[in-house]
Image (cartoon, rainbow, N blue to C red):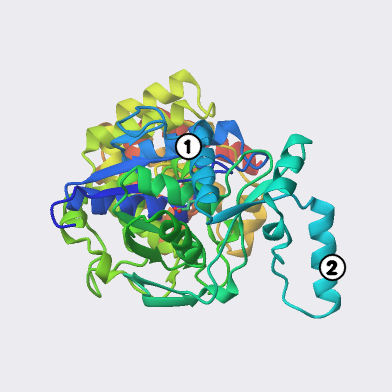
């Protein structure tokens, strides 16, 4: 195997979005291919008709592309082992099923759904573990051809050897041994001509020369079945790595409740693909105890199948936000500005004029806001502060300040007076600070009280970006207008 080209594959069934778990599977395959100078293959496993939605193939492909996980061979770009979509490979599966039948390793099963249901019910009644009773294995050659000639439908079952010990090594779970006595003669080809997952995956992994299989732990129990097919066809085993589950932070099953989990939604919510990849790498693969941030090249260099953690990984949305914030701060400001503007233009929440103003001020806004931002969409709120029409909440009416014994109207009038003074001709943060401090002195109150009134008046909330700089960026006219509007609101 030493000189053999390394070939790995990601083989999604197009049943929904690409979520964090499958993205991790894809990424680990990709990292391993890059590290080993091998090939990464994208195969679509769409033979379970009924469960598949055509548009989900595109969603999955687009999510992978957005993450920057590209493939060397696949449905859209072809390759030496095409086609890469299982529904286009049905003849191949038929051919191998026939070969297995010819060699006595599989047989046709003519039992109808009803008959099988009846058999299952019988074993439930007698408290027996159900497995197919091999009724159709007993059919004579004549009975079989009569059945076929009369148009009777059949599926194909693999003939599982009795009490065979199936052994394989997994890079995460170690040596695994399973006795075939626990495996029934499972169906490999359904009566509608469609292969079952275990059969088509085994055939394709072999035909596509896959050397390493890296997939979710939920497939660990399928592996012995696939190996029975390998054995029956005399295929060499690939190398196996099953990735431990990803649990929610509370140890339960991961769901939307724990923060979004589809890659599509990360894109919509303003995550950066490089941050998502970095975070995904941390799910089950820890280079050491403390390193959190890795560049793609570092991840490729350091990735190792043997260092995947056996313990289930825990999904931590807060950490993902943290990593994303880190990557946002690392971005070149011009690139960040582009991403922000792209996002705002897509929302319909701003007029052209608002957007233009905001854009012109971005070089000043970014440095004072990016420390606290965790996703690009956080800029929607920031943009409202700088360029939207401010609407005041009832929570911040007269009563709010009355309780605090603060005369908000008087404070704002005084602020307007000082900001209008000719001495504030250079409307910059320093002069604005001086003016506001003078207001605090006049009212003989702590500066934070003044700041709270002004923040609410200027952008509707008691918290937000740095006050003086924000007012400077807003400019004199806008600021004065907002202060006056708030007096009107207070009535
Ligand atoms: N189609 C399978 C899935 O989406 C892939 C299993 C495998 O990688 O073998 O879970």
Q: Is residue 241 visible?
A: yes
Residue 64 percent across, percent down from the top left? 39, 40
* Residue closest to the eye, 276 or 173: 173
Q: On screen, 328 above or below 92?
A: below
Furthest residue to the top? 352
Q: CA distance from mark 2 to mark 1?
A: 35 Å
Quadrant including the C terminus: top right
Q: Residue 429 falls in which quadrant of the image?
A: top left
Query: Mark 1 = which residue?
Result: 92
Residue 209 percent across, percent down from the top left? 31, 46
| Residue 319's disc number | none
Number of marks drawn: 2
SS assignment at label 1: helix
Q: Are marks 2 and 1 in contact (CB under 8 Å)?
A: no
Disc 2 packing (10 Å; few <14; some 14–19; many ≥20): some
Question: Image point 50% across, 39% down: which residue?
Answer: 95
Disc 1 packing (10 Å; few <14; some 14–19; many ≥20): some
Mark 2 vs 1, N-terminal side: 1
Quadrant including the N terminus: bottom left
| Residue 121's disc number | 2
Furthest residue to the bottom? 127
SS assignment at label 2: helix
Question: Image point 19% across, 54% down: which residue?
Answer: 300
Classify residue 219 as left or right of residue 50.
left
Residue 69 percent across, percent down from the top left? 32, 42
Task: Name the mark nearer the viewer: 2 or 1.
Answer: 1
Residue 292 percent across, percent down from the top left? 26, 64
């Amino acid at each position: 195997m030493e000189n053999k080209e390394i070939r790995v594959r990601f083989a999604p069934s197009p049943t929904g979005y690409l979520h964090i778990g499958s993205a991790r599977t894809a990424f680990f395959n990709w990292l391993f291919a890059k590290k080993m100078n091998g090939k990464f293959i994208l195969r679509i496993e769409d033979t379970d008709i009924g469960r598949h939605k055509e548009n989900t193939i595109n969603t999955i492909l687009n999510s992978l592309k957005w993450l920057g996980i590209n493939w060397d061979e696949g449905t859209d770009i072809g390759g030496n082992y095409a086609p890469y979509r299982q529904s286009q490979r049905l003849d191949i599966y038929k051919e191998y099923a026939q070969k297995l039948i010819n060699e006595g390793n599989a047989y046709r099963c003519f039992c109808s759904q009803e008959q099988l249901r009846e058999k299952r019910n019988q074993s439930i009644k007698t408290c027996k573990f159900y497995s197919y009773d091999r009724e159709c294995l007993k059919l004579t050659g004549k009975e079989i051809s009569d059945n076929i000639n009369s148009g009777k439908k059949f599926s194909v079952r693999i003939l599982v050897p009795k009490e065979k010990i199936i052994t394989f090594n997994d890079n995460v779970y170690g040596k695994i041994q399973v006795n075939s006595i626990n495996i029934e003669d499972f169906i490999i080809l359904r009566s509608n001509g469609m292969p079952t997952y275990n059969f088509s995956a085994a055939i394709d992994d072999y035909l596509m020369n896959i050397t390493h299989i890296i997939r979710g732990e939920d497939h660990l129990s399928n592996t012995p079945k696939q190996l029975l097919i390998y054995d029956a066809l005399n295929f060499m085993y690939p190398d196996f790595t099953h990735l431990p589950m990803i649990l929610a932070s509370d140890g339960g099953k991961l769901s939307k409740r724990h923060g979004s989990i589809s890659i599509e939604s990360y894109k919509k919510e303003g995550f950066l693909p490089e941050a998502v990849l970095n975070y995904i790498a941390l799910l089950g693969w820890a280079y050491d105890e403390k390193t959190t941030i890795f560049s793609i090249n570092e991840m490729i260099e350091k990735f190792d199948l043997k260092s995947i953690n056996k313990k289930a990984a825990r999904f931590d949305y807060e950490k993902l936000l943290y990593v994303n914030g880190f990557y946002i701060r690392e971005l070149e400001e011009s690139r960040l500005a582009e991403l922000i503007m792209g996002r705002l233009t897509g929302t319909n929440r701003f007029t052209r004029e608002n957007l233009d103003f905001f854009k012109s001020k971005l070089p000043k806004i970014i440095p004072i806001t990016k420390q606290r931002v965790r996703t690009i969409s956080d800029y929607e709120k920031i943009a409202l502060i700088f360029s939207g029409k401010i609407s005041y909440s009832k929570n911040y009416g007269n009563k709010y300040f009355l309780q605090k014994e603060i005369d908000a109207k008087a404070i704002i009038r005084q602020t307007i007076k000082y900001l209008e003074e000719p001495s504030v001709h250079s409307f910059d943060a320093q002069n604005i600070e001086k003016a506001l401090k003078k207001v605090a002195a006049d009212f003989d109150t702590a500066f934070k009280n003044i700041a709270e009134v002004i923040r609410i008046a200027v952008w509707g909330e008691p918290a937000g970006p740095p006050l003086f700089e924000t007012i400077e960026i807003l400019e004199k006219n806008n600021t004065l207008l907002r202060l006056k509007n708030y007096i009107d609101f207070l009535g």
